[in-house]
Amino acid sequence: MALVTNTVTRYDATRAVREDLSNMIYNIAPVDCPVMSNVGRDTAKQTFFEWQTDILAAPANSPVLEGDDIAGTTDLRAPTTRVNNYTQINRKIVTVTGTLEAVDKAGMRSYLAYELAKAALISGAVH
């Protein structure tokens, strides 16, 4: 695939494009997290998208006495990690003849709509 000569792309204008950093911190600890599973997805506004992840502190078997003084001890904590990825443009071409659209079909009104829905699911565009 060729670009028209002298076409300026997003990758040519790197200094002019603002960063796109999610306002959410994702907990990636290996435990069930039903709240996070039900949270919506974020939308990238740039071709380079960043987000933060966090993990739970490692479990410790360190019993203490009731009323023990906590001075001088701290649990080990890790700061959030900033990760990133580039967006990608995908294309799926769907073609259906006019005759196929015109005939009576079983299980669908439009074969074109059916194929477009399948293409969107395969490419991950529709969840």
Image (cartoon, rainbow, N blue to C red):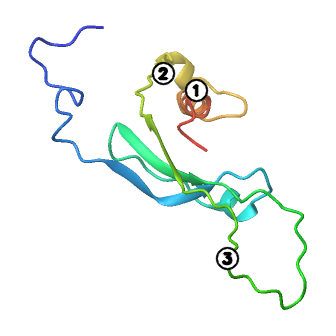
Asked whether 96 or 21 is in front, the reply is: 21
The residue tagged 1 is 115
**Mark sitting on residue 75:** none
Lateral position of residue 117 relative to residue 66, left or right = left
Amino acid, disc 2: Lys
Amino acid, disc 3: Gly
**Mark sitting on residue 92:** 2
**Mark 3 or mark 1, which has the lower sequence index?**
3
Residue 95, image x and y in percent? Answer: 48, 17
The residue tagged 3 is 72
Category of crowding for the residue at label 3, using alpha-carbon neighbours closer than 10 angstroms: few (below 14), some (14–19), many (at least 20) = few
Instruction: State how far apart marks 2 and 1 are (Cα).
Output: 10 Å
Residue farthest along the left direction in this orientation: 6
Lateral position of residue 21 relative to residue 34, left or right = left
**Mark 2 or mark 1, which has the lower sequence index?**
2
Instruction: State how far apart marks 3 and 2 are (Cα).
Output: 60 Å
Q: How many marks?
A: 3
In the displayed structure, would residue 115 be above or below residue 75?
above
Q: Secondary structure at mark 3?
A: loop
Amino acid, disc 1: Glu
In the displayed structure, would residue 99 be above or below residue 12?
above
Q: Residue at x 67, y 61 (%)?
A: 76
Q: Secondary structure at mark 2?
A: loop
Q: Nearer the viewer, mark 3 or mark 2?
A: 3
Asked whether 11 or 125 is in front, the reply is: 11
Asked whether 71 or 87 is in front, the reply is: 71
